[in-house]
Image (cartoon, rainbow, N blue to C red):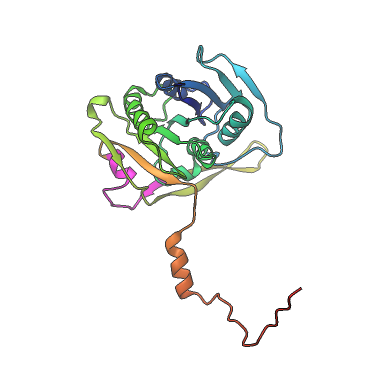
């Protein structure tokens, strides 16, 4: 049987150490092709390029692994890879390993996770990987051990339809990681401020600053797992419908028009 066809992408750029570590693992499982941004694209979320042309260039970054750099966003990379590079739909898409956390609300802003989500939207099993270390010299070896375990399970057992996995690794040596936990996304947020400064021309400009605040005390969340030495695995979905709210609104809002008390003649043509 043919090997699985695997797309590897990220948001930190094609030359980041994180994607190199991910490629090293994925070549053990199948035929890998890399399509990643030509420059860092962190925080791009699910942005796509619509007003500028995209450039796609084949590069030699990972030896024998076919690799392409794209001038667009992480989501652009997935879209153009599926349409222009692969002869068939990939069997798996993995994104990362991101330098920094994508746990909790960070999943909304993450280019790493949005790339994986775009693949999932197209029906491709997808996983995003992130390490809680922003350093360029971060140690990805402990994460690689768990990525192998996770991918083996994904290829054997699959991922539920219309969902993908958000995996985060604590910044710990292998000996101190306690294992993996399937979690829910913690209810947390960024409390942000804009630091106002003045440029040499006397005009104001702003730098985004802020603090991450987690008020969720549940022991079943990704934040709890990471703070307690576990790898967090959160199944997420791109259907943003709040299904419980549908019932609430139907019961508590007066939004349904009442039928007029009159007969309507329906004439047959």
Q: Is residue 204 above or below residue 154?
A: below
Residue sticking out furthest to the front: 268
Q: Position of residue 183 (x, y in %)?
A: 32, 45
Q: Position of residue 220 (x, y in %)?
A: 28, 48
Determine the image quadrant of residue 212: top left
Does 117 appear in magenta? no
Q: Quadrant of the C terminus?
A: bottom right
Q: Nearer the viewer, residue 227 or 211?
A: 227
Q: Quadrant of the N terminus?
A: top left
| Residue drawn at 52 percent across, 22 percent down | 33
Magenta region, residue range: 211-227
Q: Is residue 209 above or below residue 19?
A: below
Determine the image quadrant of residue 174: top left
| Residue drawn at 51 percent across, 39 percent down | 123
Left/right placement of residue 189 relative to residue 178 reads right
Determine the image quadrant of residue 201: top right
Residue sticking out furthest to the top: 63
Q: Is residue 261 above or below residue 180?
A: below
Q: Position of residue 226 (x, y in %)?
A: 30, 38
| Residue drawn at 65 percent across, 36 percent down | 200
**Figure disc tally:** 0
Left/right placement of residue 183 relative to residue 164 reads left
């Amino acid at each position: 049987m043919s090997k699985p066809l695997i797309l590897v992408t990220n948001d930190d750029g094609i030359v980041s150490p994180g994607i190199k570590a991910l490629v090293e693992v994925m070549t053990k499982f199948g035929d890998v092709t890399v399509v990643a941004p030509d420059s860092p694209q962190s925080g791009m979320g699910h942005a796509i390029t619509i007003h500028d042309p995209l450039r796609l260039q084949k590069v030699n970054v990972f030896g024998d692994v076919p690799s392409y750099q794209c001038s667009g966003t992480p989501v652009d990379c997935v879209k153009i890879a599926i349409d222009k590079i692969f002869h068939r739909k990939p069997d798996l898409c993995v994104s990362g390993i991101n330098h920094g956390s994508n746990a909790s609300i960070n999943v909304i802003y993450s280019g790493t996770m949005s790339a994986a989500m775009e693949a999932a939207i197209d029906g491709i099993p997808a996983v995003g990987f992130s390490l809680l270390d922003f350093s360029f010299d971060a140690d990805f070896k402990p994460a690689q051990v768990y990525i192998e375990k996770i991918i083996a399970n994904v290829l054997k057992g699959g991922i539920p339809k219309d969902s993908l996995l958000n995996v985060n690794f604590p910044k710990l040596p292998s000996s101190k990681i306690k294992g993996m936990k399937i979690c829910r996304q913690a209810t947390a947020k960024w409390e942000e401020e804009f630091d106002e400064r003045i440029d040499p021309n006397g005009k104001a400009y702003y730098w985004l600053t802020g603090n991450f605040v987690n008020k969720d005390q549940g022991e079943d969340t990704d934040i709890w797992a990471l703070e307690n030495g576990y790898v967090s695995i959160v199944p997420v979905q791109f259907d943003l419908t709040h299904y419980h709210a549908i019932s609430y609104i139907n019961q508590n809002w007066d939004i349904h028009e009442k039928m007029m008390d009159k007969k309507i003649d329906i004439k047959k043509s």
